Image (spheres, rainbow, N blue to C red):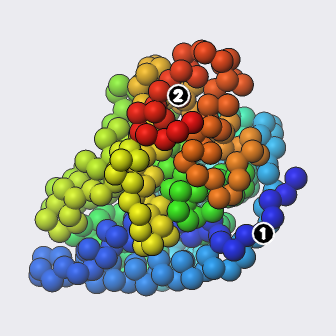
Amino acid sequence: MQLPAQNFSTAHCSIIPPYLLRRLARQDAPQFSAAARAAKEALVHVRSFQAARTQPAPVVPVTVRHARPGQPQRSVYDAGGTETLPGKLVRKEGEPASGDASTDEAYDGLGHTHRLYADLFGRNSIDGEGLPLDATVHFGKLYDNAFWDGRQMVFGDGDGEVFQRFTRSLSVIGHELAHGVTQFSAGLAYRNQAGAINESMSDVFGALVEQYVNKQSVKEASWLIGEGLFTPQVEGAALRSMKAPGTAYDDDVLGKDPQPDSMDSYVRTSADNGGVHINSGIPNRAFYLVAEALGSNAWEAPGQIWYDALTSGSLPVTATFGVFARATASSAVELFGPGSPEHDAVLQAWETVKVKV
């Protein structure tokens, strides 16, 4: 089975929202001069991504959901401050640590993410068929972003004033690789509510990678995406909070986290591809509420339900929140039965965030 080509692409999905970069680019304070310049350059890059999305996306197969997992095949490259990909190969599968923090964090993060999908979902790498995992570090000069370009991961070093290196956060690595999983399964459009679901799925699995590696229960986990990216100058904990969307940061330079936590505050905008990074807070909170209601570990029943909904082959590429909510409810019934605690938790979570199932 194949998904038809669409007039959009899931490639080039970046972790830093354009609205945050725009705010930073307007800063004229001397202590943030490097950050402002870096944000302007990153915005140019983001605009080029958006232009690329007007081109037809490649036809991608619906993957085999339970292919036999193999060992990861990781390669990390160093762009050396250029924007040439992939760069110089600096560490490949099985080699010892290089001593470069970005290289080794990327290598480890690729492995941790591969293990989550293999151990819990029987998935053989990002595409389900053993796709080699490639990453490039030290991309650009003071580059304020990390992104999945449809084939590999790319990490900037940050500007040093607002953002630190982007390999510091395992949830960021897991987030970006999850865009690849979505690309090779549901192929969700990167616009409007389908794009917000696309972003939310990446936050969900980014959080799950971090929790699985650290063996954190639902209560022990921070539920923060991008924790550790900000420098000490920023009043904020992370880019986003799944537990409490809209509370991740409140800073004089970056402003206040704009994410809504229910449809009551849904943001209607043409910016950011229809608010994909903003409105993802709504399905993010729904997932957290399911995990909170069930307790134990989020990668167990909640993760299984969300993964099944994503990879079932039933989601249209332009799925709305309501369509996705119904898919998760159906997955809960299929996996755990109608009226089960898992099914009830899913229904209650979507009701709380005001999405009709």
- Taking the spot 34% from the left edge, 27% from the top edge, the residue there is 220
* Mark closer to the observer (2, 1): 2
Q: Which residue is mark 1?
A: 5
The first of marks 2 and 1 along the sequence is 1
Give me the disc on residue 227: none
Give me the disc on residue 347: 2
Residue 275 image-quadrant placement: bottom left
Please name the amino acid that badge 2 sits on.
Leu
Q: Residues within 10 Å of mark 1 (few under 14, many from 20)?
A: some
Between 200 and 262, the one lying in front of the other is 262
Q: Is residue 146 visible?
A: no
Q: Is residue 77 above or below residue 319?
A: below
Q: How many numbered circles are shown?
A: 2
Q: Position of residue 350 (x, y in %)?
A: 48, 35
The alpha-carbon separation of the residues under discs 2 and 1 comes to 33 Å
Dot 1 lies on which element? loop
- Taking the spot 31% from the left edge, 68% from the top edge, the residue there is 20
Q: Is residue 38 left or right of residue 120?
A: left
